[in-house]
Amino acid sequence: LAQDKKWRIGFSQATTIEPWRAQFNKDIIAEAAKHPEVELIVTDGEDKTEKQVADVENLIRQEVNALLISPKESAGLTGVVQQAIDAKIPVFVLDRNVETDQYTQFVGGDNKLIGRAAGEYAVELLGGKGKAQGNVVEIWGGMGTQPAHDRHDGFHEFTDKEPGIKNLLDQQSGDWKQDQAYNIMATALRNNEKIDLVYGHNDPMAYGAYLAAKDAGREKDIKFIGIDALPGEGVTWVNNGELTATFLYATPGAEGLRQAIKFLNGEKVEKTVTLDTMRVTKENAGQIMKDNGL
Ligand code: FRU
């Protein structure tokens, strides 16, 4: 360890092919650059559970002072997180959970709350409480992840109360990917003459569905809702009128690293740090882009 480096922190990322995760890595690396006492080691699970498990085992062997992990899925990464905990390494779980609560801290958005906000807005778009009418296509994120389940549950707390809303699909997962969502939507369009609203568990999938509808000449009849609100993606698509709304899911990169440093410096940290969300529609999309230099 170089003289000025006090803490060696490992960060195991699930994948970097998804734009939100690329931003997440940028955020954590930028934060690390502000702390000369920290050496940050970033690994890329390449969207494969086995690879991410091997990454974490490696970081444990390197005896990092703290481990940050954003797991690809809950079940497959639980064992290795437990190994780190058993090795007395403080573990900070970011964005997606694992099936143990013996970690030091969880940092991420409240996906149930975001799902509720999306559901409430969907009801409004389809005619309002008690009067909403429409056929809905929901495209799930990865089935083995808590965010997908929470985004589903929150949404349905609102839409299931509306007898006029019909769900056209049953648990169809696009695994967070634009191209998979495109295919799901292309099939849904062939099978259904009337689709009124698409709820994608993230923006790439909502946008993939939009592109499928556009290719079928039906995009004008359909409202598209996504989640993430990256300025160069979801927010831009909302500003272009392609998506109707997206909900901010801030990356926990900067905050996660700050919390780990705080803990390593002997300060107390909360068990859970929840990041704020907001709704992005045509009304505020342009301003958000400007604020981000777009
Ligand atoms: C990126 C991503 C985001 C989504 C998050 C959920 O891998 O799919 O688009 O909001 O993961 O964990």
Image (tube, rainbow, N blue to C red):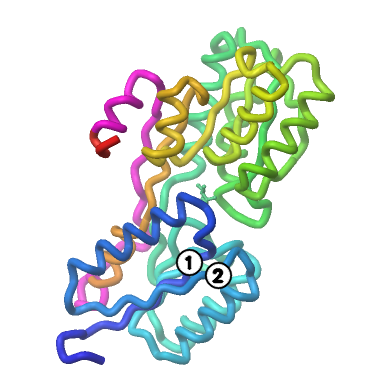
Quadrant of the rendered image containing residue 254: bottom left
Other-residue count near label 1 (Cα within 10 Å), few / some / many at <14 / 14–19 / ≥20: many
Q: Nearer the viewer, residue 36 or 98?
A: 36
Quadrant of the rendered image containing residue 3: bottom left
Specify start and end residues of the magenta stretch as a single range: 262-290
Q: Is residue 129 above or below residue 236?
A: above
C-alpha separation, residue under disc 1 versus residue under disc 2: 6 Å
Q: Is residue 65 magenta?
A: no
**x and y percentages locating residue 274 in the rendered image:** 36, 50
Q: For mark 1, give the secondary structure.
A: strand
**x and y percentages locating residue 1 in the rendered image:** 26, 92
Q: Residue furthest right?
A: 191
Please report whichever mark, 1 or 2, sits nearer to the chain's N-terminal start. Answer: 1
- Whether tag 1 and tag 2 are in contact, CB under 8 A, the answer is yes
Quadrant of the rendered image containing residue 279: top left
Residue drawn at x 37%, y 77% as measured from the top left: 41
The three-letter amino acid code for the residue at tag 2 is: Gly
Q: What residue sits right under mark 2 in the picture?
A: 45
Residue drawn at x 59%, y 30% as measured from the top left: 157
The three-letter amino acid code for the residue at tag 1 is: Gln
Q: What residue sits right under mark 1 in the picture?
A: 13
Q: Is residue 162 left or right of residue 45?
A: right
Residue drawn at x 44%, y 45% as measured from the top left: 110
**x and y percentages locating residue 239 in the rendered image:** 40, 24
Q: For mark 2, give the secondary structure.
A: loop
Q: Is residue 2 above or below residue 226?
A: below
